[in-house]
Amino acid sequence: IQHLYLVRHAESQFNLEHRIGGDPSLTQRGWEQARALARHFQAIPVPFVFTSTKKRSQETASILIEQQKKCIVHALPEFDEIHAGICEGLTYKEIAERYPKEYLARKKDKYNYCYPQGEGYASLYERVYRGLKKALFLSGAAAGTMIVGHQAINRMILANFNFRRTRNVPYISIPQEQYFHIILTHRKKMVEMVPIVP
Ligand code: F6P
């Protein structure tokens, strides 16, 4: 049996300001969430942790990594959040004001839409699955593996285990104070949502 823990990074400064993308650090509340995550996993072995290359992902994992007895860490660019191109650093309100056509186009077909000079869900597919394959290969079949990803990334990973229609994938709820526990056996996959109680 392989246990995969799919965690979203804790609250970042941009989350607080409703800004997308960028490379912000955690807020004070985010650091508390990171501590809660570490405590939650104190008695659960996580020998492999995969983060993105972004600060909010690495900071979220940092306390847990210190507290685990044995833990190998990889930062994979494949797990970096969707790149919003010309909309990086903006709020959704600012996008609607500055780029109304883009805003509407995304609303109409969020899965296939691609930000100018950036990415979309459909275009993320390839790199996210490359990352997932890498993570599962590096951690080996028997291990407890954690991925500390981002909203769009975790939606794509989850969709791989829990089949959804592609057009629904960009709307899957990925809360910050819960994680998805994905249990893989030879015969089946199970996904449960677990609240992070310290
Ligand atoms: O708001 C946080 C965030 O991770 C952004 O960086 C990213 O652009 C967004 O979520 C992805 O979610 P959605 O596809 O719903 O805009």
Image (cartoon, grey):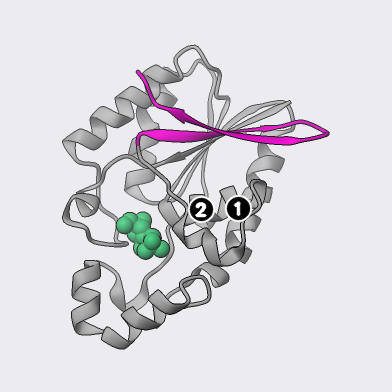
As drawn, 140 above or below 117: above
Secondary structure of residue under mark 2: helix
Residue 2 placement, left or right of 56: right
Relative image position of residue 60 (x, y in whole percent): 35, 36
Location of residue 128 by image quarter? bottom right
Magenta extent: 177-198
Whole-percent x, y for residue 65 in the image: 43, 26
Q: Provide the major secondary structure of the magenta segment.
A: strand
Q: Position of residue 168 (x, y in %)?
A: 53, 61
Q: Residue at x 47, y 53 (%)?
A: 172
Q: Is label 1 in a helix, a strand or a loop?
A: helix
Q: Are marks 1 and 2 in contact (CB under 8 Å)?
A: yes
**Residue 90 visible in the picture:** no
- Mark 2 close to ligand 1, CB under 8 Å: yes
Name the image quarter holding residue 100: bottom left
Would you name the residue on which mark 1 appears?
Answer: 159
Does the stretch in magenta take in 183? yes
- Mark 1 crowd level (few <14, some 14–19, many ≥20, 10 Å Cα): some
Left of 150 or right of it: where is 69?
right
Residue 67: percent from left, percent from top: 41, 18
The residue under label 2 is 155
| Image quadrant, ligand 1 | bottom left
Quadrant of the image containing the C terminus? top left
